[in-house]
Amino acid sequence: MTMVPERWMRAALAATSGLALAAAFPKLDLNLLAWVAFVPLLYAVEGERPWVALQYGWMQGFACYIASLYWVVITLHSFAGVRTALALLPLILLGLQPSQLALFGAGQPPNLCSLL
């Protein structure tokens, strides 16, 4: 039996945190999960460098957005007649959208770049 590398375990914790946060929103509406959804992410970033912690945080946000915006695929497929495989593209692009703000530094003070 092989051990799971620590980075994969941390990535799984970050993704679990995102899915738990998405479950706090409507459709599942398990709103009490919002209070504890960030705990796995905090374990994932514990003791990591800021750049690595940013990557785990991005992974958590991506998982949350993808799970929260599931309805985009259903809408495009049902009402616009787009094939399901093609309707996944806007979902992925919408999931990546918040990372554009981080990557291109929209509204960041210059001091934040020194952390990277």
Image (cartoon, grey):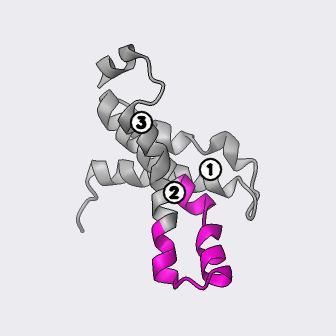
Q: In what element is the residue under mark 1?
A: helix
Mark 3 nearby-residue class (10 Å; few <14, some 14–19, many ≥20)? few
Query: In the rendered view, does 30 fall on the left or right side of 42?
Result: right
Q: Nearer the viewer, residue 33 or 77?
A: 77
Residue type at numbered disc 3: Ala
Which residue is label 1 attached to?
Answer: 21
Residue 94, numbered circle: 2
Q: Is residue 85 above or below residue 26?
A: below
Residue type at numbered disc 2: Leu
Q: In what element is the residue under mark 2?
A: helix
Asked if the residue at tag 2 contacts the one at tag 1, i.e. Cβ–Cβ closer than 8 Å, the answer is: no
Residue type at numbered disc 1: Leu
Asked if the residue at tag 3 contacts the one at tag 1, i.e. Cβ–Cβ closer than 8 Å, the answer is: no
Separation of disc 1 and disc 3 at Cα? 20 Å
Residue 52, numbered circle: none
Which residue is label 3 attached to?
Answer: 102
Q: Earlier in the sequence, mark 1 or mark 3?
A: 1
Residues in magenta? 64-89
What residue lies at 26% left-to-right and 59% top-to-bottom? Answer: 3
